[in-house]
Amino acid sequence: MEKNSIRWEVLLKSVRGTLSSEEEIIFQKWLARDIRHKAYYEKMCRVWSSDNTTYDLHTDVAEMIVRFDDYVRNKRKARHRKILRNIYRSVACLLILLTVGGGLMLLKKDKQEIETANRIAGSILPGQGKAIILLPNGEKIDIASLSDSLSYRTAGFTVEKDSGIIRYMKRQQARTDYHTIVIPIGGEYQVKLSDGTMVWLNSDSRLKIPTAFVGNERRVFLSGEAYFDVVKNDRKPFIVETDLGNIKVYGTEFNVKRYSGDRQLKATLVEGSIGFSNDQVAELKLQPGYQLSLIEGISEPTVEKVKVYNEIAWKDQRFCFENRTLESIVRDMERWYNVKIVFEDPVLKQLQFSGSLSRYGEIETLLHFFEESADITFEVDNHTITVKKIKK
């Protein structure tokens, strides 16, 4: 296989959120290899941008894929953009048909539906790189106020605004100074700790870290959501402390989600080994592909096998969900788009959806997706969105 090519099966499974761990690695490498790959993939997922598209339930999927592959192969040098856009749209429609409900589904917009785009004034934007660094002396460094073209360097760390990374330098310290990285609603940022560990921070999160790891452990304090790629050090374990318990790590990749509004802690292991413990639970170890969940007020956590990419897709700029309730999906949307979403009827909270969409798309794209998949509509008033059932 050419280094710039990828099997259609992998793309299809990515859109559906059903990639295996090996396929996920293949997909992410392909996505990162060329900026055009990302644009290509996002076009495939934008079926709902076409207002008049319908597909018959008996569409020959294999034949359509072969035709598309042949066309791209023959026309790559010519780059016939106008025709290619139309074909992208057709393939995107096909992929979404495969995404929703696990099978082909007729996508035809209700003629009575008022376009969501006309109900949104354009003020609801997706999140972006935002962070505030709280220093021990009370000083606040708002990264948004820094120059876009210059790196901000001070004692112990550097802010690279163009790449969205705060880098802490490895150095010897006799005492421990702590910084708190605050990610506001509608923000995200990456932090490289002094030991080389990488941390991706999601919206509405706080990470308290030492500027250098002194002593026999590496301990950080988290509220919100973060993905960790921890540098291995058997002599100095890495510990993520939350208000519901601690995750102990020796060198691995995992995701921790602990928002107080969700009333739940979730720790998802990608690779390696982690252990969870608190005052009531002795260390409980996880295997890759499993998720630990602890609900507030319940002493015993549960452990179950999950589709890992659905839990960590946010760090790769995607919303991925499979048979997930609308109530849980909109909580993530509220934090990312800085909106308030309310339900006219509590029953609507339990509607389940499956899909894979860009986190950097307009919110109307998500709303269109839900409207096309269920008998609901959205009423937008400034930054408040009401979910309503369509009255027949």
Image: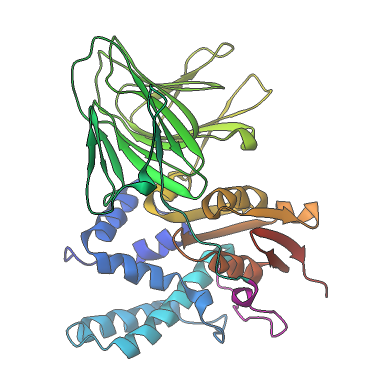
In the rendered image, residue 34, in percent from the top left (x then y), is placed at 22, 64
Considering the image in quadrants, where does the C terminus appear? bottom right
Q: Nearer the viewer, residue 390 or 305?
A: 390
Left or right of 24 on screen, residue 345: right
Quadrant of res 367: bottom right
Which secondary structure type mostly characterizes the magenta part of the structure? loop
Q: What colour scheme has been applied to the protein in the rendered image?
A: rainbow
Q: Up-down: is 90 above or below 181? A: below
Residue range (magenta): 103-119
Q: Residue 100: x, y in percent?
A: 56, 65
Identified at 40% across, 77% down, the residue is 62
Question: Which residue appears at 21% of the width and 86% of the height?
Answer: 74
Residue 276 point in image, percent of width and height? 48, 21
Taking depth in this image into account, of 258 and 118 the one nearest to the observer is 118
Residue at the spot x=28%, y=51% of the render? 147
Residue at image position (72%, 52%) is 349
For this rendering, which residue is in front, 120 or 270? Answer: 120
Does residue 309 show up? Answer: no
Residue 353 in the image, given as x and y percentages of width and height: 61, 58
Whether residue 272 can be seen here:
yes
Q: Quadrant of the N terminus?
A: bottom left
Is 120 in the magenta?
Answer: no
